[in-house]
Image (spheres, helix red, strand yellow):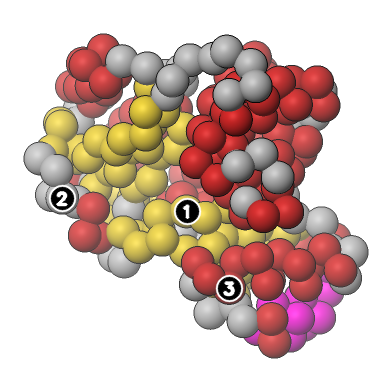
Amino acid sequence: MSGHSKWSTIKRKKGALDAKRGKIFTKLIKEITIAARLGGGDPDGNPRLRTAIQTAKGANMPQDNITRAIAKGTGELEGVNYEECAYEGYGPNGVAILISVLTDNRNRTGAEIRHILTKNNGTMAEPNAVAWNFEKKGLFLVLQESVDEETLMELALEAGAEDFESSDDFFEIHTAPDAFETVRGALEQSGIPTESAELAMLPKSTVKLEGREAEQMLRLMEALEDNDDVQNVYANFDISEEQMAEASA
């Protein structure tokens, strides 16, 4: 299972989604707003908006919040003009980190990201220093207890998935970006629930971390994601299931 996927499962096990619901809602509203601004307010014709809405509903966001966020994106309601940008950095033992943000003040956010990295044994990197090590992929996480492995694998591969893995409590499905909607539609039509469905930047290679470095990396990931402007953090660390379990305890 990729470092990004492991981190996604750790957040769920630690209950971070419930503990920081207000912060999560803020991030989701930003994503819905900019998705509507860039691609229009109709989710049927805007895959990014459709994904954002489904993620928001999965986090139990009220429909009124979703509707207002779309209206701000399309200009029907006044709202903040967010800018998309990415920062790159290094974590313990040279782990590559790609940080996706939505901000109304690039200078403020850049300074905050730099401070978080420096404080947690990381450093800021120049543009494109680590981005080459990541590629955009569709990523689905499905609870193992919710479906038979052979059934899910056959369905996913027939729908166009590139890869299928089984690890910990989840099945992990990877797709090319242009196959994401097809695979999601196949899962929905078959009534298979997903814990996570997103277009993510997944690493081409990984760095093994153990002991203190692994602990530092997990603290850095949590600190970055705790920033209001950070939407996603992708990193190429590989940490053992045992140490992940300790961190999520």
Q: Quadrant of residue 54?
A: top right
How dense is the environment of label 3, judged by Cα within 10 Å: few (below 14), some, or many (20 and up)?
some
Q: Secondary structure at mark 3?
A: helix
Q: Quadrant of residue 90?
A: top left
- Residue in view at x 57 percent, y 28 percent: 73
Distance of label 3 from label 2 (alpha carbons): 26 Å
State the residue in front, 38 or 219: 38
State the residue in front, 78 or 180: 78
Residue 113, percent from left and from top: 27, 22
Q: Is residue 165 left or right of residue 55?
A: left
Which label belongs to residue 200? 1
From this view, report whether residue 23 is shown above or below residue 167. Answer: above
Amino acid type shown at disc 2: Asn
Q: Is residue 241 left or right of residue 49?
A: left
- The magenta stretch is 147-157
Q: Predominant secondary structure in magenta?
A: helix
Labels 1 & 2 near each other (Cβ < 8 A): no
Q: Which residue is mark 3?
A: 179
Q: Secondary structure at mark 2?
A: loop
Q: Earlier in the sequence, mark 1 or mark 3?
A: 3
Residue 71, percent from left and from top: 67, 25
Residue 60, percent from left and from top: 80, 29
Amino acid type shown at disc 3: Ala
From this view, report whether residue 197 is shown above or below residue 60. Answer: below
Magenta residue check for 150: yes
Query: Can residue 73 be seen from the camera position used here?
Result: yes
Which label belongs to residue 128? 2
How dense is the environment of label 2, judged by Cα within 10 Å: few (below 14), some, or many (20 and up)?
few
- Residue in view at x 26 percent, y 12 percent: 108
Query: Can residue 8 be seen from the camera position used here?
Result: no
Amino acid type shown at disc 1: Ala
